[in-house]
């Protein structure tokens, strides 16, 4: 089943969302009047894509957003756990910051080089705001008062087998150096529910290596299940102003661990309050798989 087939079973865009999107992009068009993007960013394509995908956001994944009041009208480096086997979490966070956060903004998501180089998807990602995650690109965006979405776990975040679900992988350090260089606050985010889109997964690294891809999940379902998604936004974290962005890795790591801790707390809260999803089947099977993985 393809995305178009999924969308055909979902109710079309509601009148309320249609009006809201029109108002949001009316404001964004004023913001981007003088903006010149070197990667092909297309605000019109962003709007049409949002109109196409909003039924997935509202009705298929039934996204809820908590902590939107923590987001002020200023640029952030938004840092999230990476979860769910395919990068739908980035899409849903981006949609949340358009539809359920005020003022609405388009997050500029950092993507892996593998994704950026794909013939069609790489171009589409760039046109809808994503860019290759290197320091020069981030610097350009921050200077233009854009907010950046990063997943410091990288591919290790999404490529978890069932026993590792919701276990945060160690963060890379680059995002914190960028935040330091520009004194940009970090906004911690946790996505809950995406692991349940593909509830029974096993990663065989040797197969992925053979096909020269970052990850290749073996899963019982090929289409993401309609697991309800919760996005938890924490309070902004100000960077340590006494620290240089060129400080040794050890000193940067101490600060990054604090960001990890905040996101772990958001994950813990989110897991405690997540909505049930086939729990009578999923929970005992997941428990059995985890037990087998630990034995």
Image (cartoon, rainbow, N blue to C red):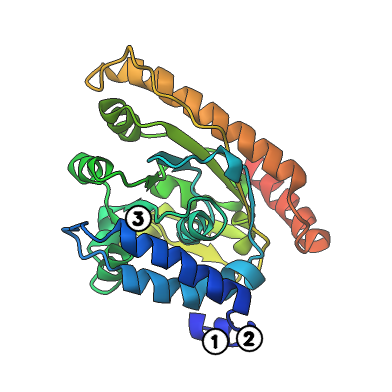
Task: Tell me the element at label 3.
Answer: loop
Q: Which residue shows up at 25% across the image and 43% down it?
A: 138
- Asked where in the image residue 87 lies, by quadrant, the reply is bottom left
- Asked where in the image residue 255 lies, by quadrant, the reply is top left
Task: Tell me the element at label 2.
Answer: loop
Residue situated in front as seen by the camera: 236 or 166: 236
The disc label shown at residue 5, or none: 1
Q: Which of marks 3 and 2 is nearer the N terminus?
A: 2
> Residue tagged by mark 3?
214
Task: Say whether residue 98 is left or right of residue 128.
Answer: right
Residue that extends furthest to the top in the rendered view of this protein:
242
Task: Say whether residue 52 is left or right of residue 29.
Answer: right
Q: Which quadrant of the figure contains the C terminus?
A: top right
Task: Tell me the element at label 1.
Answer: helix
Where residue 193 sits in the image (x, y, percent)?
Answer: 64, 55
> Residue tagged by mark 2?
9
Q: Which quadrant of the figure contains the N terminus?
A: bottom right
Distance from disc 3 to disc 2, alpha carbons, whole Å, reads 32 Å
- Asked where in the image residue 226 lies, by quadrant, the reply is bottom right
Q: Which residue shows up at 58% across the image and 80% down it?
A: 13
């Amino acid at each position: 089943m393809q995305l178009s087939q999924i969308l055909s079973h979902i109710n079309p865009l509601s009148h309320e969302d249609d009006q809201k999107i029109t108002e949001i992009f009316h404001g964004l068009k004023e913001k981007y009047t003088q903006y010149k993007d070197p990667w092909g960013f297309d605000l019109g394509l962003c709007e049409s894509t949002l109109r196409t995908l909003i039924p997935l956001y509202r009705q298929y994944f039934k996204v809820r957003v908590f902590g939107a009041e923590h987001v002020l009208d200023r640029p952030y480096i938004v840092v999230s756990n990476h979860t769910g086997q395919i990068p739908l979490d980035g899409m849903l966070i981006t949609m949340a910051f358009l539809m359920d956060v005020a003022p609405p903004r388009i997050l500029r998501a950092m993507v892996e080089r593998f994704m950026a180089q794909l013939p069609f998807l790489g171009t589409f990602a760039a046109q809808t705001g994503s860019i290759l995650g290197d320091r020069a690109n981030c610097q350009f965006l921050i200077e233009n008062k854009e907010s950046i979405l990063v997943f410091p776990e990288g591919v290790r975040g999404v490529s978890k087998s069932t026993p590792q679900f919701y276990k945060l992988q160690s963060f890379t350090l680059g995002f914190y150096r960028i935040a330091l260089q520009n004194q940009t606050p970090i906004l911690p985010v946790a996505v809950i529910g995406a692991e349940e889109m593909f509830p029974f997964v096993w990663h065989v690294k040797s197969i992925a290596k053979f096909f020269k891809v970052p990850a290749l999940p073996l899963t019982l379902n090929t289409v993401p299940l309609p697991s309800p998604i919760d996005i938890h936004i924490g309070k902004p974290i100000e960077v340590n102003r006494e620290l240089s962005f060129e400080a040794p890795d050890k000193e940067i790591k101490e600060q990054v661990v604090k960001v990890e801790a905040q996101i772990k707390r958001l994950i813990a809260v989110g897991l405690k309050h997540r909505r049930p999803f086939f729990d009578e089947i999923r929970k005992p099977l997941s428990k059995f798989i985890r037990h087998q993985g630990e034995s």
